[in-house]
Every structure is written in C-alpha cells, then in structure tokens.
Image (tube, rainbow, N blue to C red):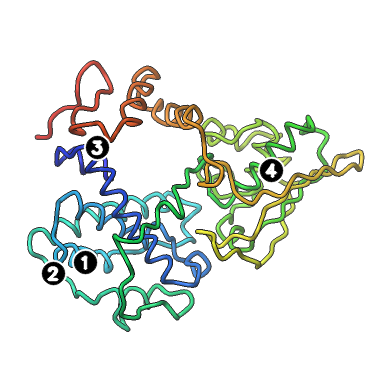
C-alpha cells in the first residue's frame, strides 16, 4: 500500500520508510492500549488495527498536519473490520486489501476537508471500546509518547518465513528441524503430535483442507508439508499438492493439544513455546526442541539471502527471476531512492501515472 501510494505521489524512498514507521507506531500503540487479544473474540487484527495504521502512513505521505491526520484516523476508525472466521476463504485477503484501501481513502478524505470525531478512538462509544476483547482498553487522557518513544526498535519487524498462517510457524520450524536432524521418512510415521495454543487452533480451523487456500489455515497440512516436502512454500500451496494421497494420509495422523497459557510480551496471543513430536510405526517417539520464536521474527531474523530468496520466489510469479533480483536490490537500498518511480523492473522505469 505504501509503495503503491508513494508511486502515485512520486515519493522518495525515505518518505516511504518514514510513512511505514508512522503506521507501525500507531498500530503498536493501539495494541499496547488493549490488554486482550483481538483474535480470541473473532477480530482480525490486520484488518482492524491495520486500517488505522494505513491511514496514519498515508497521512504521512500526504504530509497532512496534525489535525487532518487526526481526522484521517477518526474516519478510518469507522472503516475497520475483519473476522477470523473468514480465514479459510478468499475474504481473509480481501480484509487486508480493504484495510489498505480504507487507509488511503480516509487520508484522502481528510486532506480534502472531510472530518471525523476527534475523540473517535477514546470516546466511551468509540473505536477502542467497540473493538475491545477485554472491555478495559486504556483510554485515559495522558501523553502516550507517540513520536517520542519509539516502539519499533523494541518490538521490531516480524517477517513471515512461510506463506501460511503465522500461528503455524513455530510448529513448522520444530518439524523441519526434527525431520531434518532425524531423517524421518513420512511412510514411517504413525502419529504427529503438536502442542500449541488454543488461540492458534481457533485460527487454524481447516483440519482436512482440499485446496491451497484452505491449507493456509491448517496445522495438519503444515505438518504434512514440512515432513513430505521438507519445506512449506508457495509450491506446496496448490490444490494438486494438498490433494495428494500421501499428504492427505499424513494429515489424518496429526493430533493437536492446546494450552490457554500466554506470553505477555508477545505481539500475538501465543503460549511460551510450540513443540512437536513424531511417533514412528516402530513405537519410537522423536521430540523437537521447544520453539519460542519462529524464524523471521525480530528475535530470529532472516538473513539477506533468505529474504532475497523469499522475495524472488514471490515476485517470480509475475516477473522473470532476473527482474525480481534487480527489484530486490533496489528495494534493499530504498532509503537512497530519490523517487519510487525510478524503480526499474524491466528495461525501463515504471510507466508514469495517467
């Protein structure tokens, strides 16, 4: 969203990074003010808090003053929506797209003079209370140090290592490590046991998916793919792979147990760790290490090569690999880019907007 809007405006790379930080800080503050977990009452955080974060980011790109930015946030507060129940369908992605669209629209309306209630967030009938799982959001009047105490260096940026629900990632890491170190043959597996959080399993509602889309929200599929393919990537998220006999057979052997225990400093309602064990047909049980943080998290950051591989794998669906590699190098040096319109993916720059 920031990249697309920046291209429309001819923004510099530094402008885009500043806008990202503005959106991040707004989202992080909203999350800190709510002690409950949005997932647990059916709200999709990206579609709810993300809408306001997008409005803040675009307001920064548009260089709105404080009052108009406040109006943009107020307007976006009435546009925020999204449910966990739709995670098994195309609508999950639609919710994220609508959050970005709403942020752009809210900031554009505010720039044109459109208004919202300036207490739309903290009012007793406002955004924070309406979307509060706990019923006790912090709406006190005080300086929340937005723009002076930076939350990004504290919480960091978490990159999804695998193109499936984040709730599976720690278990996938555990399974990949276990399968690789023990050289487990899928045909030798009697049962896979996963211990995770009940909030994760609330999101992972597809126990026997039949399509790549449904498989994104299935712990059973995640374990089967990790064991059989030794990876969980876009190549596995196709209907043909999900419907393979060996994949479906292994999915029936996955058993999940859950805990309600959570970790307070997490940005997700997750338990202290995920753990996976594999029971072989011989009766032998192999157990993984407990995984506290997934690969790609701020605490276990991906290397540049790993990020490049992920980027090229994704962008390669639309671009040739050489073009995707070139685009990655340019984006890696985004802060030096004088204008987003200077990005080159083919032999020339991107077309100018009409």
Marks 4/2: CA–CA distance: 49 Å
Q: Position of residue 156 (x, y in %)?
A: 45, 50
Distance, label 1 to label 3, CA atoms, is 27 Å
Residue 85 percent coordinates (x, y): 49, 61
Marks 1,2: beta carbons within 8 A: yes
Percent x, y of residue 273:
67, 55
Above or below: residue 148 compared with residue 162: below
**Label disc, if present, on residue 114 of the rendered structure:** none
Displayed quadrant of residue 44: bottom left
Numbered circle sitting on residue 174: 4
Cα distance, mark 1 to mark 4? 43 Å
**Front one among 234 and 196:** 196
- Whether tag 1 and tag 3 are in contact, CB under 8 A, the answer is no
Q: Is residue 167 above or below residue 336?
A: below
Crowd around label 1: few <14 · some 14–19 · many ≥20 (10 Å) = many
> Are the residues tagged 4 and 3 within 8 Å (C-beta)?
no
Task: Write down the quadrant of residue 2 in the picture.
Answer: top left
In this rendering, position of residue 43 left or right of residue 191: left
> Which callout, 4 or 3, points at the residue further toward the start of the chain?
3
Identify residue for label 1: 75
> Where, by quadrant of the figure, is residue 103 drawn?
bottom left
Q: Earlier in the sequence, mark 1 or mark 2?
A: 1
Which numbered marker is on residue 13?
Answer: 3
Label 2 sits on residue:
115
């Amino acid at each position: 969203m920031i990249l697309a809007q920046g291209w429309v405006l001819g923004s510099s790379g530094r402008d885009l990074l500043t806008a990202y930080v503005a959106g991040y800080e707004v989202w992080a503050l909203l999350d800190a003010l709510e002690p409950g977990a949005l997932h647990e009452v059916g709200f999709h955080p990206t579609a709810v808090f993300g809408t306001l974060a997008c409005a803040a980011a675009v307001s920064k790109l548009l260089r709105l003053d404080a009052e108009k930015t406040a109006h943009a946030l107020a307007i976006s507060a009435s546009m925020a929506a999204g449910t966990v129940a739709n995670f098994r369908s195309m609508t999950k992605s639609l919710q994220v797209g609508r959050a970005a669209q709403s942020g752009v629209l809210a900031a554009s309306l505010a720039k044109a003079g459109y208004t919202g209630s300036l207490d739309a967030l903290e009012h007793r009938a406002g955004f924070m209370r309406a979307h509060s799982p706990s019923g006790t959001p912090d709406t006190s009047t005080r300086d929340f140090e937005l723009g002076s105490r930076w939350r990004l260096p504290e919480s960091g940026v978490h990159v999804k290592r695998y193109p499936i629900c984040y709730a599976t990632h720690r278990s996938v890491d555990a399974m990949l490590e276990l399968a690789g170190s023990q050289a487990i043959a899928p045909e030798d597996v009697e049962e896979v046991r996963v211990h995770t959080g009940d909030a994760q399993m609330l999101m992972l509602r597809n126990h026997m998916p039949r399509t790549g889309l449904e498989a994104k929200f299935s712990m059973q599929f995640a374990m089967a793919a990790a064991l059989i393919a030794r990876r969980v990537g876009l190549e596995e998220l196709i209907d043909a792979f999900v419907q393979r006999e060996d994949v479906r057979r292994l999915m029936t052997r996955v058993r999940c147990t859950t805990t309600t225990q959570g970790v307070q400093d997490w940005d997700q309602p997750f338990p202290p760790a995920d753990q996976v064990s594999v029971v072989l047909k011989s009766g032998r049980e192999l157990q993984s290490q407990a995984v506290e943080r997934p690969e790609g998290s701020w605490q276990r950051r991906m290397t540049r090569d790993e990020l490049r591989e992920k980027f090229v794998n994704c962008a390669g669906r639309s671009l040739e690999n050489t073009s995707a590699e070139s685009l990655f190098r340019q984006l890696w040096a985004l802060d030096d880019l004088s204008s987003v319109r200077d990005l080159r993916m083919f032999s020339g720059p991107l077309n100018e907007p009409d």
